[in-house]
Amino acid sequence: MTVPVPVLLDDRQRGGPFAAWLARYHVDRLRQLGLRAARVIHAPGLATWLDLEAAESRYLAVASSDGTASLLSHELSPVAVLGRAPAGGAGAAGHRFAVSAVAWYPRDSALVLTAGLDGAVKTWDANAGVVAESFDMGSRVWALALSRLHCLAAVGCEDGSVRLYDLASGTTLHQLGEGHDRAAVWAAAWSPTAEHQLLTGAADGTARLWDVRRWGGSLAVLDFERTSGSEAVSDEAGERLGESMAFATRPDRSAPSRVGSSFASWAARSAVPDPAAQARARGARAHAGPITGLAATPDGRHWLTAGGDDALRCWDAAALTNTLRHFPGAFNRARRPKRLALALAGDAVFAPSGSAALGWDVATGAALCTLRGGHFESINACLWNEATQELYSAGDDRLVLCWGHEGAGAGDEEDEDFH
Protein backbone atom coordinates (compact mmCIF):
# COMPACT_ATOMS: atom_id res chain seq x y z
CA MET A 1 0.00 0.00 0.00
CA THR A 2 1.31 3.43 -0.93
CA VAL A 3 1.13 6.01 1.84
CA PRO A 4 0.27 9.54 0.62
CA VAL A 5 3.14 12.01 0.94
CA PRO A 6 1.09 14.48 3.07
CA VAL A 7 0.43 11.69 5.57
CA LEU A 8 4.14 10.88 5.77
CA LEU A 9 5.06 14.53 6.25
CA ASP A 10 2.46 14.95 9.00
CA ASP A 11 3.72 11.79 10.70
CA ARG A 12 7.28 13.09 10.56
CA GLN A 13 6.32 16.45 12.04
CA ARG A 14 4.41 14.78 14.87
CA GLY A 15 7.16 12.26 15.57
CA GLY A 16 4.91 9.31 14.71
CA PRO A 17 5.90 5.67 14.11
CA PHE A 18 7.09 6.25 10.55
CA ALA A 19 9.32 9.11 11.67
CA ALA A 20 10.77 6.92 14.42
CA TRP A 21 11.40 4.09 11.96
CA LEU A 22 13.05 6.45 9.47
CA ALA A 23 15.31 7.88 12.17
CA ARG A 24 16.40 4.37 13.21
CA TYR A 25 17.01 3.46 9.57
CA HIS A 26 19.36 6.40 9.02
CA VAL A 27 21.20 5.76 12.28
CA ASP A 28 21.70 2.10 11.37
CA ARG A 29 23.06 3.12 7.95
CA LEU A 30 25.95 4.83 9.70
CA ARG A 31 27.31 1.35 10.43
CA GLN A 32 28.02 1.03 6.70
CA LEU A 33 30.14 4.17 6.30
CA GLY A 34 33.40 3.62 4.46
CA LEU A 35 36.32 5.64 3.15
CA ARG A 36 35.70 7.44 -0.15
CA ALA A 37 39.15 6.79 -1.60
CA ALA A 38 38.61 9.22 -4.47
CA ARG A 39 38.04 12.10 -2.05
CA VAL A 40 41.33 12.74 -0.30
CA ILE A 41 43.16 16.04 -0.09
CA HIS A 42 46.44 17.12 1.49
CA ALA A 43 46.32 20.25 3.64
CA PRO A 44 49.34 22.60 3.58
CA GLY A 45 49.98 21.84 7.25
CA LEU A 46 48.53 19.76 10.06
CA ALA A 47 44.75 19.95 9.58
CA THR A 48 43.52 21.28 12.93
CA TRP A 49 39.84 22.16 12.39
CA LEU A 50 36.93 21.89 9.93
CA ASP A 51 33.74 23.82 9.28
CA LEU A 52 30.96 23.65 6.68
CA GLU A 53 29.06 26.63 5.30
CA ALA A 54 25.46 26.38 6.41
CA ALA A 55 23.57 27.91 3.48
CA GLU A 56 24.07 25.14 0.90
CA SER A 57 26.53 22.76 2.59
CA ARG A 58 28.79 22.94 -0.46
CA TYR A 59 32.03 24.39 0.89
CA LEU A 60 34.40 23.41 3.67
CA ALA A 61 37.01 25.46 5.49
CA VAL A 62 40.10 23.69 6.82
CA ALA A 63 42.36 25.26 9.45
CA SER A 64 46.04 24.46 9.12
CA SER A 65 49.14 24.61 11.30
CA ASP A 66 51.01 26.69 8.69
CA GLY A 67 48.83 29.73 9.45
CA THR A 68 46.47 29.33 6.50
CA ALA A 69 42.88 28.18 5.99
CA SER A 70 41.94 26.20 2.90
CA LEU A 71 38.53 26.42 1.23
CA LEU A 72 37.32 23.23 -0.43
CA SER A 73 34.22 22.06 -2.24
CA HIS A 74 32.17 19.36 -0.53
CA GLU A 75 33.85 16.91 -2.92
CA LEU A 76 37.22 18.02 -1.48
CA SER A 77 38.30 19.93 -4.57
CA PRO A 78 40.56 22.94 -3.77
CA VAL A 79 38.91 26.34 -4.15
CA ALA A 80 41.15 28.88 -2.38
CA VAL A 81 43.71 29.33 0.39
CA LEU A 82 43.31 32.18 2.87
CA GLY A 83 46.45 33.72 4.34
CA ARG A 84 48.97 32.65 1.73
CA ALA A 85 51.00 35.33 -0.05
CA PRO A 86 50.62 35.39 -3.85
CA ALA A 87 53.66 34.39 -5.90
CA GLY A 88 56.10 37.28 -6.01
CA GLY A 89 53.89 39.41 -3.77
CA ALA A 90 54.17 40.77 -0.27
CA GLY A 91 53.25 38.64 2.72
CA ALA A 92 49.54 37.94 3.10
CA ALA A 93 47.78 39.23 6.20
CA GLY A 94 47.38 35.71 7.55
CA HIS A 95 48.24 34.22 10.94
CA ARG A 96 51.83 34.11 12.14
CA PHE A 97 51.30 30.76 13.84
CA ALA A 98 48.90 27.83 13.54
CA VAL A 99 45.20 28.42 12.86
CA SER A 100 43.40 26.70 15.73
CA ALA A 101 39.80 27.20 14.59
CA VAL A 102 37.85 28.24 11.51
CA ALA A 103 34.14 29.01 11.05
CA TRP A 104 31.84 30.19 8.29
CA TYR A 105 29.61 33.13 9.14
CA PRO A 106 26.12 31.50 9.18
CA ARG A 107 24.37 34.52 7.65
CA ASP A 108 26.82 35.15 4.81
CA SER A 109 28.83 32.35 3.21
CA ALA A 110 31.23 34.92 1.75
CA LEU A 111 32.67 35.53 5.24
CA VAL A 112 35.02 33.15 7.03
CA LEU A 113 36.46 33.60 10.53
CA THR A 114 39.78 32.19 11.67
CA ALA A 115 41.38 32.10 15.12
CA GLY A 116 45.06 31.48 15.70
CA LEU A 117 47.74 30.78 18.24
CA ASP A 118 49.11 34.24 17.47
CA GLY A 119 46.16 35.61 19.47
CA ALA A 120 44.37 37.01 16.43
CA VAL A 121 40.79 36.54 15.26
CA LYS A 122 40.34 37.45 11.60
CA THR A 123 37.31 37.91 9.37
CA TRP A 124 37.98 37.07 5.71
CA ASP A 125 36.26 37.94 2.46
CA ALA A 126 36.19 34.45 0.97
CA ASN A 127 35.73 35.72 -2.58
CA ALA A 128 38.62 38.19 -2.53
CA GLY A 129 40.81 36.21 -0.13
CA VAL A 130 41.58 39.28 1.97
CA VAL A 131 41.19 40.15 5.65
CA ALA A 132 38.19 42.37 6.37
CA GLU A 133 38.71 42.68 10.16
CA SER A 134 41.41 41.56 12.57
CA PHE A 135 41.49 41.66 16.37
CA ASP A 136 44.25 40.84 18.82
CA MET A 137 42.93 38.95 21.84
CA GLY A 138 46.22 39.22 23.73
CA SER A 139 46.41 35.46 24.28
CA ARG A 140 46.43 32.29 22.19
CA VAL A 141 42.96 31.56 20.84
CA TRP A 142 41.80 27.93 20.97
CA ALA A 143 38.03 28.09 20.58
CA LEU A 144 35.72 29.95 18.20
CA ALA A 145 31.93 29.56 18.20
CA LEU A 146 29.28 31.27 16.05
CA SER A 147 25.50 31.11 16.35
CA ARG A 148 22.82 31.14 13.66
CA LEU A 149 20.55 33.12 15.98
CA HIS A 150 22.60 36.31 16.30
CA CYS A 151 25.80 38.07 15.23
CA LEU A 152 27.97 37.24 18.24
CA ALA A 153 31.10 35.11 18.10
CA ALA A 154 32.52 33.57 21.27
CA VAL A 155 36.29 33.32 21.60
CA GLY A 156 38.07 31.05 24.10
CA CYS A 157 41.67 31.95 25.01
CA GLU A 158 44.62 30.25 26.65
CA ASP A 159 44.55 32.70 29.57
CA GLY A 160 41.10 31.34 30.51
CA SER A 161 39.11 34.30 29.24
CA VAL A 162 35.92 34.02 27.19
CA ARG A 163 35.23 37.05 25.02
CA LEU A 164 32.43 38.14 22.73
CA TYR A 165 33.06 39.53 19.28
CA ASP A 166 30.26 41.37 17.43
CA LEU A 167 30.33 40.51 13.73
CA ALA A 168 27.74 43.12 12.83
CA SER A 169 29.81 46.05 14.07
CA GLY A 170 33.24 44.43 13.87
CA THR A 171 34.10 45.15 17.49
CA THR A 172 34.70 43.21 20.70
CA LEU A 173 32.02 43.50 23.38
CA HIS A 174 33.16 42.25 26.74
CA GLN A 175 34.71 39.40 28.66
CA LEU A 176 32.44 36.90 30.40
CA GLY A 177 33.13 37.08 34.12
CA GLU A 178 36.52 35.76 35.15
CA GLY A 179 36.48 33.04 32.52
CA HIS A 180 37.92 29.69 33.56
CA ASP A 181 40.38 30.79 36.27
CA ARG A 182 43.39 30.83 33.94
CA ALA A 183 42.73 27.36 32.47
CA ALA A 184 42.88 27.41 28.66
CA VAL A 185 39.42 27.43 27.07
CA TRP A 186 39.49 24.66 24.47
CA ALA A 187 35.85 24.41 23.44
CA ALA A 188 32.78 26.61 23.07
CA ALA A 189 29.27 26.13 21.68
CA TRP A 190 26.08 28.21 21.58
CA SER A 191 22.71 26.78 22.49
CA PRO A 192 20.62 26.40 19.29
CA THR A 193 17.40 27.29 21.14
CA ALA A 194 18.33 29.59 24.05
CA GLU A 195 20.10 32.23 22.00
CA HIS A 196 21.98 33.88 24.87
CA GLN A 197 23.35 30.68 26.42
CA LEU A 198 26.94 29.67 25.76
CA LEU A 199 28.77 26.58 27.04
CA THR A 200 32.55 26.60 27.34
CA GLY A 201 34.99 23.86 28.30
CA ALA A 202 38.53 24.22 29.60
CA ALA A 203 41.75 22.29 30.06
CA ASP A 204 41.06 21.91 33.79
CA GLY A 205 37.97 19.78 33.10
CA THR A 206 35.42 22.49 33.92
CA ALA A 207 32.44 23.30 31.71
CA ARG A 208 30.56 26.53 32.38
CA LEU A 209 27.24 27.74 31.10
CA TRP A 210 26.94 31.49 30.51
CA ASP A 211 24.09 33.86 29.90
CA VAL A 212 25.89 36.44 27.79
CA ARG A 213 23.38 39.15 28.76
CA ARG A 214 24.75 39.06 32.30
CA TRP A 215 27.84 40.98 33.29
CA GLY A 216 28.69 38.73 36.21
CA GLY A 217 29.92 35.14 36.50
CA SER A 218 28.80 31.96 34.83
CA LEU A 219 25.23 30.74 35.05
CA ALA A 220 26.16 27.21 36.13
CA VAL A 221 29.01 24.70 36.25
CA LEU A 222 28.53 21.16 34.95
CA ASP A 223 29.33 18.52 37.56
CA PHE A 224 29.68 14.88 36.47
CA GLU A 225 28.66 13.79 39.98
CA ARG A 226 25.32 15.58 39.69
CA THR A 227 22.76 13.25 38.13
CA SER A 228 18.99 13.30 37.93
CA GLY A 229 18.77 11.61 41.33
CA SER A 230 21.28 13.85 43.09
CA GLU A 231 20.90 17.20 44.77
CA ALA A 232 19.66 19.93 42.46
CA VAL A 233 21.52 23.07 41.51
CA SER A 234 21.69 25.82 44.07
CA ASP A 235 18.47 27.80 44.31
CA GLU A 236 20.04 30.94 42.89
CA ALA A 237 21.64 29.12 39.96
CA GLY A 238 18.42 27.27 39.21
CA GLU A 239 16.44 30.48 39.36
CA ARG A 240 18.83 32.24 36.99
CA LEU A 241 18.81 29.29 34.59
CA GLY A 242 15.03 29.31 34.59
CA GLU A 243 14.99 33.02 33.85
CA SER A 244 17.43 32.50 30.99
CA MET A 245 15.39 29.69 29.45
CA ALA A 246 12.16 31.63 29.86
CA PHE A 247 13.68 34.70 28.24
CA ALA A 248 14.71 32.63 25.22
CA THR A 249 11.07 31.75 24.50
CA ARG A 250 9.61 35.23 24.99
CA PRO A 251 8.24 36.71 21.76
CA ASP A 252 9.56 40.16 22.68
CA ARG A 253 13.06 39.01 23.61
CA SER A 254 15.79 41.30 22.46
CA ALA A 255 19.41 42.00 23.25
CA PRO A 256 21.71 44.40 21.52
CA SER A 257 24.02 42.76 18.99
CA ARG A 258 26.05 45.92 18.50
CA VAL A 259 28.54 47.38 20.89
CA GLY A 260 28.02 50.76 22.48
CA SER A 261 27.09 52.55 25.65
CA SER A 262 23.59 51.07 25.49
CA PHE A 263 25.03 47.54 25.58
CA ALA A 264 27.40 48.33 28.43
CA SER A 265 24.74 49.96 30.58
CA TRP A 266 22.22 47.22 29.77
CA ALA A 267 24.72 44.46 30.60
CA ALA A 268 25.76 46.21 33.81
CA ARG A 269 22.14 46.29 34.96
CA SER A 270 22.02 42.52 34.36
CA ALA A 271 25.03 41.88 36.61
CA VAL A 272 24.34 39.68 39.63
CA PRO A 273 26.52 37.67 42.03
CA ASP A 274 27.93 34.52 40.45
CA PRO A 275 25.21 31.81 40.84
CA ALA A 276 27.80 29.11 40.14
CA ALA A 277 30.13 30.23 42.94
CA GLN A 278 29.12 27.34 45.20
CA ALA A 279 29.86 24.71 42.56
CA ARG A 280 33.15 26.39 41.72
CA ALA A 281 34.14 26.46 45.39
CA ARG A 282 33.75 22.72 45.74
CA GLY A 283 35.73 22.10 42.54
CA ALA A 284 32.88 20.76 40.38
CA ARG A 285 34.11 19.41 37.04
CA ALA A 286 32.50 17.89 33.98
CA HIS A 287 35.50 15.63 33.32
CA ALA A 288 38.48 14.34 35.25
CA GLY A 289 40.67 15.40 32.33
CA PRO A 290 40.72 18.37 29.95
CA ILE A 291 37.58 19.06 27.92
CA THR A 292 38.56 18.61 24.29
CA GLY A 293 35.20 19.17 22.61
CA LEU A 294 31.54 19.92 23.17
CA ALA A 295 28.37 20.29 21.14
CA ALA A 296 24.64 20.92 21.53
CA THR A 297 21.97 18.76 19.93
CA PRO A 298 19.88 20.73 17.38
CA ASP A 299 16.76 20.55 19.57
CA GLY A 300 18.67 22.16 22.44
CA ARG A 301 17.75 19.39 24.87
CA HIS A 302 21.22 17.97 25.45
CA TRP A 303 24.86 18.98 25.65
CA LEU A 304 27.64 16.56 24.72
CA THR A 305 31.15 16.91 26.15
CA ALA A 306 34.32 14.95 25.40
CA GLY A 307 37.19 14.79 27.88
CA GLY A 308 40.72 13.54 28.21
CA ASP A 309 39.48 11.07 30.83
CA ASP A 310 38.31 8.69 28.07
CA ALA A 311 34.71 9.80 28.53
CA LEU A 312 31.99 11.21 26.32
CA ARG A 313 29.12 12.58 28.40
CA CYS A 314 25.55 13.58 27.61
CA TRP A 315 23.92 16.28 29.75
CA ASP A 316 20.31 17.31 30.23
CA ALA A 317 20.38 20.94 29.07
CA ALA A 318 17.39 21.96 31.19
CA ALA A 319 18.36 20.32 34.50
CA LEU A 320 22.13 20.46 33.81
CA THR A 321 22.52 16.91 35.05
CA ASN A 322 24.71 14.06 33.85
CA THR A 323 22.43 11.55 32.11
CA LEU A 324 24.94 8.76 32.87
CA ARG A 325 24.63 7.56 29.27
CA HIS A 326 27.54 5.24 28.53
CA PHE A 327 29.43 5.65 25.26
CA PRO A 328 31.73 2.60 25.11
CA GLY A 329 35.26 2.83 23.78
CA ALA A 330 35.53 6.63 23.98
CA PHE A 331 39.32 6.59 24.21
CA ASN A 332 40.63 10.16 24.33
CA ARG A 333 43.98 11.25 25.74
CA ALA A 334 44.20 14.41 23.64
CA ARG A 335 45.80 17.52 25.07
CA ARG A 336 44.27 19.96 22.61
CA PRO A 337 40.82 20.68 21.11
CA LYS A 338 39.05 18.01 19.05
CA ARG A 339 35.87 18.73 17.12
CA LEU A 340 32.78 16.58 17.72
CA ALA A 341 30.32 16.04 14.87
CA LEU A 342 26.59 15.60 15.40
CA ALA A 343 24.81 13.73 12.61
CA LEU A 344 21.22 13.06 11.58
CA ALA A 345 19.69 15.99 13.48
CA GLY A 346 21.51 15.00 16.65
CA ASP A 347 20.67 11.29 16.61
CA ALA A 348 24.33 10.31 16.27
CA VAL A 349 27.69 11.74 17.30
CA PHE A 350 31.21 11.22 15.96
CA ALA A 351 34.39 11.91 17.92
CA PRO A 352 38.10 11.66 17.08
CA SER A 353 39.92 8.87 18.93
CA GLY A 354 43.55 8.61 17.94
CA SER A 355 43.71 7.87 14.22
CA ALA A 356 40.09 6.62 14.18
CA ALA A 357 36.69 8.30 14.20
CA LEU A 358 34.12 6.68 16.47
CA GLY A 359 30.35 6.95 16.10
CA TRP A 360 27.60 6.42 18.70
CA ASP A 361 23.83 6.59 18.98
CA VAL A 362 23.13 9.65 21.14
CA ALA A 363 19.84 8.29 22.51
CA THR A 364 21.25 4.97 23.75
CA GLY A 365 25.02 5.39 23.74
CA ALA A 366 25.36 2.29 21.53
CA ALA A 367 28.47 2.14 19.36
CA LEU A 368 27.66 2.49 15.65
CA CYS A 369 30.96 2.41 13.81
CA THR A 370 34.72 2.74 14.01
CA LEU A 371 36.25 4.42 10.96
CA ARG A 372 39.87 3.34 10.57
CA GLY A 373 42.43 2.90 7.84
CA GLY A 374 42.36 6.40 6.42
CA HIS A 375 44.51 8.46 8.76
CA PHE A 376 48.04 7.66 9.87
CA GLU A 377 48.17 10.25 12.66
CA SER A 378 45.67 11.61 15.19
CA ILE A 379 42.38 13.01 13.92
CA ASN A 380 41.65 16.54 15.11
CA ALA A 381 38.17 17.19 13.74
CA CYS A 382 35.08 15.39 12.51
CA LEU A 383 32.38 17.14 10.49
CA TRP A 384 29.05 15.79 9.21
CA ASN A 385 27.40 16.98 5.99
CA GLU A 386 23.67 16.43 6.37
CA ALA A 387 23.03 17.21 2.69
CA THR A 388 25.33 14.50 1.34
CA GLN A 389 25.18 12.13 4.35
CA GLU A 390 28.97 12.10 4.54
CA LEU A 391 31.54 12.54 7.29
CA TYR A 392 34.74 14.53 6.88
CA SER A 393 37.82 14.07 9.05
CA ALA A 394 41.04 16.07 9.36
CA GLY A 395 44.25 15.03 11.07
CA ASP A 396 47.89 15.55 11.93
CA ASP A 397 48.89 13.60 8.80
CA ARG A 398 47.70 16.67 6.80
CA LEU A 399 44.89 14.63 5.28
CA VAL A 400 41.25 15.62 4.91
CA LEU A 401 39.17 12.51 4.18
CA CYS A 402 35.57 11.77 3.28
CA TRP A 403 33.57 8.81 4.62
CA GLY A 404 30.29 7.84 2.96
CA HIS A 405 28.21 5.11 1.40
CA GLU A 406 29.07 3.35 -1.83
CA GLY A 407 27.40 4.92 -4.86
CA ALA A 408 26.55 8.16 -3.01
CA GLY A 409 27.68 11.66 -3.86
CA ALA A 410 27.06 12.49 -7.48
CA GLY A 411 29.15 15.45 -8.58
CA ASP A 412 27.61 18.91 -8.80
CA GLU A 413 28.68 21.94 -10.75
CA GLU A 414 30.64 24.24 -8.46
CA ASP A 415 30.49 28.01 -8.45
CA GLU A 416 33.74 29.94 -8.29
CA ASP A 417 32.36 32.55 -5.91
CA PHE A 418 30.71 32.29 -2.51
CA HIS A 419 27.30 33.94 -2.30
Image (cartoon, rainbow, N blue to C red):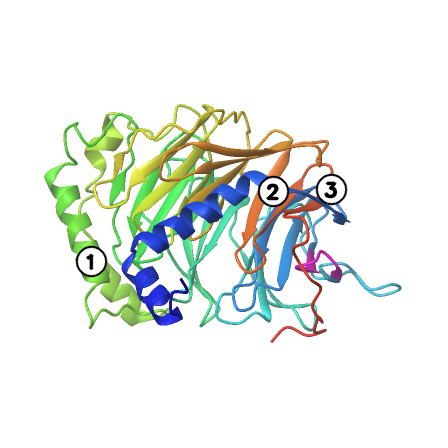
Name the residue carrying label 3.
398
Amino acid on which disc 2 is placed: Leu
Which residue is more in the foreground, 282 or 350? 350
Q: Which mark is residue 26?
A: none
Q: How far is disc 2 from disc 1 in space, using C-alphas?
A: 48 Å
Q: Secondary structure at mark 3?
A: loop
Answer yes or no: is residue 109 visible.
Answer: yes
Q: Secondary structure at mark 2?
A: loop
Residue found 57% across the figure and 69% down from its top: 109
Q: Is residue 119 above or below residue 287?
A: below
Q: Which residues are magenta?
A: 70-78
Quick check: marks 3 and 1 in contact, CB under 8 Å?
no
Name the mark nearer the viewer: 3 or 1.
Answer: 3
Name the residue carrying label 2.
33
Amino acid on which disc 1 is placed: Ser
Lower position in the chain sequence, tag 3 or tag 1: 1
Q: How far is disc 2 from disc 3 in space, using C-alphas?
A: 22 Å
Q: Position of residue 187 (x, y in %)?
A: 46, 43
Lower position in the chain sequence, tag 2 or tag 1: 2
Task: Please state if 120 lies on the left or on the right of 87 as rendered.
Answer: left
Residue found 36% across the figure and 66% down from its top: 9
Q: Residues within 10 Å of mark 3 (few under 14, many from 20)?
A: many
**Total marks drawn?**
3
Name the residue carrying label 1.
270
Q: Position of residue 7 (x, y in %)?
A: 33, 67
